[in-house]
Image (spheres, helix red, strand yellow):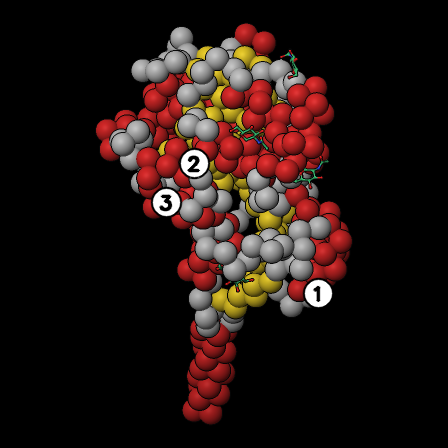
């Protein structure tokens, strides 16, 4: 009798110990695959903020973090890298278009593991991958609100440089135009789409001409990545106000105000990777992370938790005033609690609230200009 109880008790204690040990020491391995390319040590990049978010959410001993970057931002580099980190990790977070094929392949190979990809949407969805997006429509909409608030006391003309004409870019461009009309019904929102995100054939030059030769446009928003930044650098250097995108471009691309035109960069609409990576990893660790569909991160009233936010006004605070900032904060509150609908259909990227699917007035790009003046302008064009 005595021995039986003792052995039962002993067995129970063992169970308890092993359970406790597991509970305390079992740890989750998370791999975050950041972008590749030359900018990794630069301050203010999405790489820097993604790393911060990952380290905030994944802390030892319960969570082990493996951070890696492909050598370059190419599909081949991701295909080379991802299988190497896959076997040791439970969860994976990758980013962007160039990672998508490799992510899909590795996810198929490990159907029991969970994956997330930021800034890319799988259509149709993949069972063990979450597509994680910033709400591009809201991003464009707040840029449009700010541009219109500034332009409505001036020429009532603003513009957006769109990247390649695909749904995520359409969401931004048509979101911008809807934002413009919301803040200033009789303002014109000029829009254009580029042929590439990386300024192939120096198309930024034609874009610069299309905007600068057009009847007094006051404010221009960059929704075209590198192509847009190069065009916007020249536009701001020529006295037109600019709104940057994705990172605080005053820091990353106007190099802390050392690039001409920096005084005309009003702010940027930042995609806060710190918030999105932190929230995604926290969700993974709490087993509160659904794959097989879309997760959208949008505006929140509290700027700390908001995946989309305005950067500082830096040298342009006399134009982008504290008053305007307060105004924008009110708009953000209304968008966050759905009092204002930005009016974009997710799948098509078209506007649901304007006839023909857009509030844009399209800008023509005049090609003959760059071929005629090509040599002259090549010599003068921006080296970045
Ligand atoms: C970019 O990411 C890598 C991790 O892969 C990190 O070591 C590096 O410090 C990051 N760069 C910055 C500027 O934070
Ligand atoms: C674009 O401009 C650069 C100089 O900034 C020049 O070297 C290059 O040849 C140009 N490319 C094309 C396709 O015109
Ligand atoms: C930059 O602006 C100047 C006008 O100040 C213009 O002559 C030049 O062609 C522009 N360069 C590019 C690359 O757009
Ligand atoms: C296009 O540019 C050329 C050369 O500068 C100019 O002669 C022509 O009028 C422009 N066309 C349009 C439609 O703006």
**Residue 289 seen in the current view:** yes
Gap in angstroms between the C-alphas marked 2 and 1: 44 Å
Q: CA distance from mark 3 to mark 1?
A: 33 Å
Q: Quadrant of the N terminus?
A: bottom left
The tag earlier along the polypeptide, 3 or 1, is 1
x and y percentages locating residue 379 in the rendered image: 64, 38
Element marked by disc 3: helix
The reply, left or right, for residue 248 in relation to residue 289 is: left
Residue pointed to by mark 3:
305
- Name the mark on residue 261: 2
Q: Residue furthest front?
A: 376
Q: Is residue 33 above or below residue 218?
A: below
Residue 14 x %, y %: 48, 82
Q: Is residue 148 above or below residue 265?
A: above
Residue 84 disc label: 1
Residue 374 lies, in percent from the top left, at 69, 29
Cβ of mark 1 under 8 A from ligand 1: no
């Amino acid at each position: 009798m005595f021995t039986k109880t003792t052995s039962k008790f002993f067995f129970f204690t063992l169970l308890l110990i092993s359970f406790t040990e597991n509970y305390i020491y079992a740890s989750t391995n998370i791999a975050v695959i950041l972008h590749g390319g030359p900018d990794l040590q630069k301050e203010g990049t999405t790489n820097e903020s993604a790393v911060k978010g990952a380290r905030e959410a994944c802390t030892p001993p319960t969570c082990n973090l493996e951070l890696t970057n492909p050598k370059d931002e190419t599909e081949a580099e991701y295909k080379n890298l991802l299988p190497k980190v896959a076997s040791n990790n439970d969860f994976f977070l990758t980013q962007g278009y160039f990672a998508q094929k490799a992510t899909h392949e590795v996810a198929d190979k490990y159907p029991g593991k969970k994956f997330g990809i930021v800034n890319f949407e799988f259509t149709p969805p993949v069972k063990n991958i979450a597509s994680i997006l910033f709400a591009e429509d809201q991003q464009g909409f707040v840029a449009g609100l700010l541009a219109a608030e500034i332009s409505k006391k001036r020429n009532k003309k603003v513009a957006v440089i769109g990247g390649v004409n695909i749904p995520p870019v359409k969401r931004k461009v048509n979101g911008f135009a809807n934002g413009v009309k919301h803040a200033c019904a009789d303002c014109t929102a000029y829009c254009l789409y580029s042929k590439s995100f990386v300024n192939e054939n120096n198309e930024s030059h034609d874009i610069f001409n299309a905007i600068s030769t057009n009847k007094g446009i006051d404010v221009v928003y960059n929704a075209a990545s590198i192509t847009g930044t190069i065009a916007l650098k020249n536009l701001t250097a020529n006295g037109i106000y600019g709104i940057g995108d994705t990172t605080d471009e005053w820091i990353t691309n106007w190099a802390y105000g050392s690039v001409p035109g920096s005084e005309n960069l009003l702010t940027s609409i930042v995609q806060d990777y710190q918030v999105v990576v932190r929230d995604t990893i926290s969700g993974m660790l709490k087993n509160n992370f659904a794959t097989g569909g879309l997760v959208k991160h949008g505006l929140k009233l509290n700027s700390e938790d908001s995946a989309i936010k305005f950067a500082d006004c830096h040298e342009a605070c006399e134009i982008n005033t504290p008053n305007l900032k307060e105004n924008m904060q009110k708009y953000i509150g209304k968008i966050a609690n759905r009092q204002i609908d930005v009016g974009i259909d997710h799948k098509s990227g078209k506007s649901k609230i304007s006839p023909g699917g857009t509030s844009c007035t399209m800008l023509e790009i005049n090609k003959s200009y760059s071929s005629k003046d090509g040599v002259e302008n090549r010599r003068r064009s921006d080296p970045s």
